[in-house]
Image: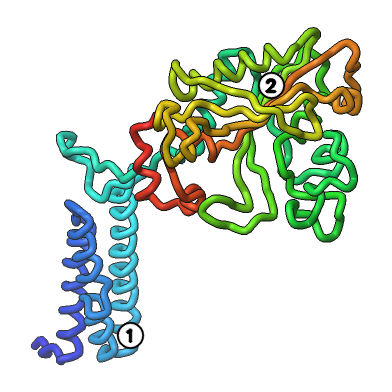
Amino acid sequence: MEHPLTGSEIRFNTMREKISLLLEEVRTFAAANAENLEQFRIRFLGRKGLLQDMFDEFKTLSVEQKRDVGQLLNELKNAAQDKVNTLMETLYSSNGSSEVETDLTMPVNFRETGTRHPLNIVRNEIIRIFRRLGFTVSEGPEIEDDWHNFSALNFPPEHPARDMQDTFFIEQDPDIALRTHTSSVQIRTMETTKPPIRSIFPGRVYRNEAISARAHCFFHQVEGLYIDKNVSFADLKQTLLYFAREMFAADTQIRLRPSYFPFTEPSAEMDISCNLCGGKGCGFCKYTGWVEILGCGMVDPNVLENCGIDSKVYTGYAFGMGIERITNLKYQVKDLRMFSENDLRFLRQFESSF
């Protein structure tokens, strides 16, 4: 005569059968999307899920029954966790899609993209123009020594640019500073390259100035250098006229005004006819019809000699412009701080500029 099953035995057999059915369900489960997978995870592995309920019921079994059922419960838990991990990798594949890619007719899920910075747009255009004239592109360090940043460029010891108000010096070594212009790269190029030299030098520079709508403690320059035999001021003028008409408009006019820079002699500042009013006069050009865009001149013989170039054989010209200045002329950006704030609302205005 068979003995009737006790309550503990009935619970034991019921749990074994339930675990077996749940294992089969886990093994055959396939998620259609991320939402289905999350529902599956919560149902099995959540704080109020099936496994938690079964572990609560597991506490009522005898010691011998717990040994048998415990192994099955752990097998079920591991199978459910492995299934979630596997499907997660499938759903969130390398292309970032959160859907199972079984329907090839589904539209592509494009992510929002950024845009180029206006300073980079203008910088690249400046480089393209001068490359058409045969200029190469050279770059150098932003942390410079006194020789390359000042002395080799003919700056006398008492020159105001050496003052702490204009230059960021390294506190531990006053001979080292953040470069105040990319002219330092001109010196490095002349020290290591034999003429002829025809190169431009784009880069970031630093000045110890208060940040405002019209000034910043860092900005960007492109400088140029041409060293060869019989280079004249007329060569400089024609080069800059070509640049102005390529960058702004074919009818752009230029004028050169006498100026002073320690590293060029003679020196000049170049204006272009205002591209907003066509030279008639407006608020932007202060009703003069002209806007200053760069400084230039013939390389001082002392600078050539400092770099080991015979000034009796070679001559050359140099020029330098602020990229922010050129960008303002092209796009009428009134606040320099906007260039360094990375505000996407501002940057997206230039998406059609390249």
Q: Amino acid at mark 2?
A: Ser
Q: Amino acid at mark 1?
A: Glu
Placement of the C terminus among the 4 image quadrants:
top left
The type of colouring in the image is rainbow
Find numbered disc 1 in the image and state the secondary structure of the residue it sits on: helix
Q: Judge whether 84 appears above or below 243 on screen.
A: below
Residue ID for mark 2: 199
Find numbered disc 2 in the image and state the secondary structure of the residue it sits on: strand
Residue at 15% from the left image edge and 91% from the top image edge: 7
Q: Nearer the viewer, residue 224 or 268?
A: 268
Q: Position of residue 72 (x, y in %)?
A: 29, 72
Q: Residues within 10 Å of mark 2 (few under 14, many from 20)?
A: many
Q: Position of residue 246 (x, y in %)?
A: 49, 19
Q: Judge whether 2 appears above or below 123 on screen.
A: below
Q: Residues within 10 Å of mark 1 (few under 14, many from 20)?
A: few
Residue at 50% from the left image edge and 38% from the top image edge: 119
Circle nearer the N terminus (2, 1)? 1
Q: Is residue 201 visible?
A: no
**Seen in the image, is 12 located left or right of residue 150?**
left
Placement of the N terminus among the 4 image quadrants:
bottom left
Quadrant hosting residue 351:
top left
Q: Position of residue 181 (x, y in %)?
A: 71, 39
Residue ID for mark 1: 64
Residue at 74% from the left image edge and 48% from the top image edge: 178
